[in-house]
């Protein structure tokens, strides 16, 4: 079954959908949409480093994405405004990444694949990493769920309950960094933010509890992956953008049928 490229692509997309639902919900609740963009842009620098030193793309992108998450957390904890920090780091990391990749001749032809993803080229090894990484992040979220939700709703209330909001923010940032590193080969650095934000935004207003919103966001992402790949197969459209376009349809429907 895994010899079929379409099945591998579908399984890879479903693996990401399982984890982008709950993570994307936190991104929406915390208004951290720009963080996903920043980490994804920084991943391009990781691609350049990986290709320059002939090492795994996943190791390079994961290292840079985690460094980005830690740096953002440290700077914001020192009183810097979140949007300012993300604005500076996102554009700087993307600029350094594009400059670095221009010095790696073998990477120039693959740049579009890393910007927009190439889910139809996913290998068995990629599948193992995606599902393994997604499982680890899901276990982490289940473990920290209640504390992260409390810290998201009210930081003062969280501190009164003995929860450190800065630690919970760091845990969330690191989980996002792992997902970005996993997703760069599937939907690319420019589209992973959409996979995080759009399904969660579509689910918002349709549910009454955080848990139901996270589950519904994953379901929307999974259906979008299936619909996007079907569209790509039958209409010869680019797979990654087709998946994101499908999520956008769900968002539009969610606005029409939004619960009051």
Image (tube, rainbow, N blue to C red):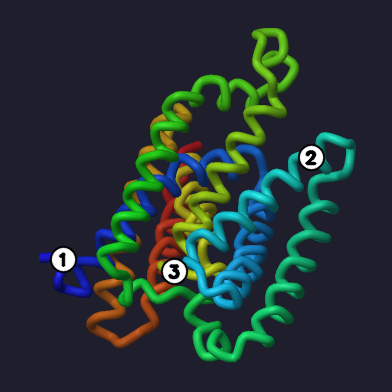
User: From the viewer's perspective, is residue 157 above or below residue 135?
Assistant: above
Spatial CA distance of label 2 from label 1 is 42 Å
Q: Quadrant of the N terminus?
A: bottom left
Q: Which residue is mark 2?
A: 74
Left or right, 27 with respect to 252, comes to: right
**Residue at (46, 45) in percent of width and height:** 258
Labels 1 and 3: the sequence-earlier one: 1
Q: Crowdedness of circle 3 by 10 Å Cα count: few (<14), some, many (20+)? A: many
User: From the viewer's perspective, is residue 84 above or below residue 60?
Assistant: above
Q: Which mark is residue 2?
A: 1
Q: Which residue is mark 3?
A: 185
Q: Where in the figure is residue 173, as x and y percent of width and height? A: 62, 42
Q: Is residue 223 visible?
A: no
Labels 2 and 1: the sequence-earlier one: 1
Labels 2 and 3: the sequence-earlier one: 2
**Residue at (48, 61) in percent of width and height:** 58
């Amino acid at each position: 079954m895994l010899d079929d490229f379409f099945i591998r692509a579908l399984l890879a997309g479903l693996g990401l959908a399982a984890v982008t639902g709950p993570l994307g919900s936190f991104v929406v609740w915390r208004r951290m949409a720009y963080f996903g963009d920043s980490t994804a842009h920084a991943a391009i620098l990781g691609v350049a480093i990986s290709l320059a030193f002939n090492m795994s793309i996943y190791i390079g992108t994961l290292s840079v994405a985690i460094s980005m998450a830690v740096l953002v957390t440290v700077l914001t904890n020192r009183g810097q405004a979140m949007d300012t920090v993300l604005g500076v780091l996102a554009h700087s990391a993307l600029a350094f990444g594009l400059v670095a990749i221009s010095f790696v001749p073998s990477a120039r032809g693959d740049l579009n694949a890393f910007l927009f993803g190439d889910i139809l080229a996913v290998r068995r090894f990629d599948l193992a990493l995606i599902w393994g990484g997604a499982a680890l992040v899901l276990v982490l979220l289940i473990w920290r769920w209640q504390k992260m939700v409390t810290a998201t709703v009210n930081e003062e209330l969280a501190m009164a309950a003995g929860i450190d909001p800065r630690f919970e923010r760091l845990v969330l940032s690191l989980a996002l960094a792992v997902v970005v590193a996993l997703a760069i080969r599937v939907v690319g650095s420019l589209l992973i933010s959409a996979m995080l934000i759009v399904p969660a935004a579509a689910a918002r207003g349709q549910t009454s509890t955080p848990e139901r919103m996270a589950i519904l966001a994953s379901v929307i992402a999974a259906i979008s992956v299936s619909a996007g790949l079907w569209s790509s197969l039958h209409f010869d459209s680019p797979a990654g953008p087709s998946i994101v376009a499908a999520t956008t349809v769900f968002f539009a429907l969610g606005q029409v049928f939004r619960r009051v």
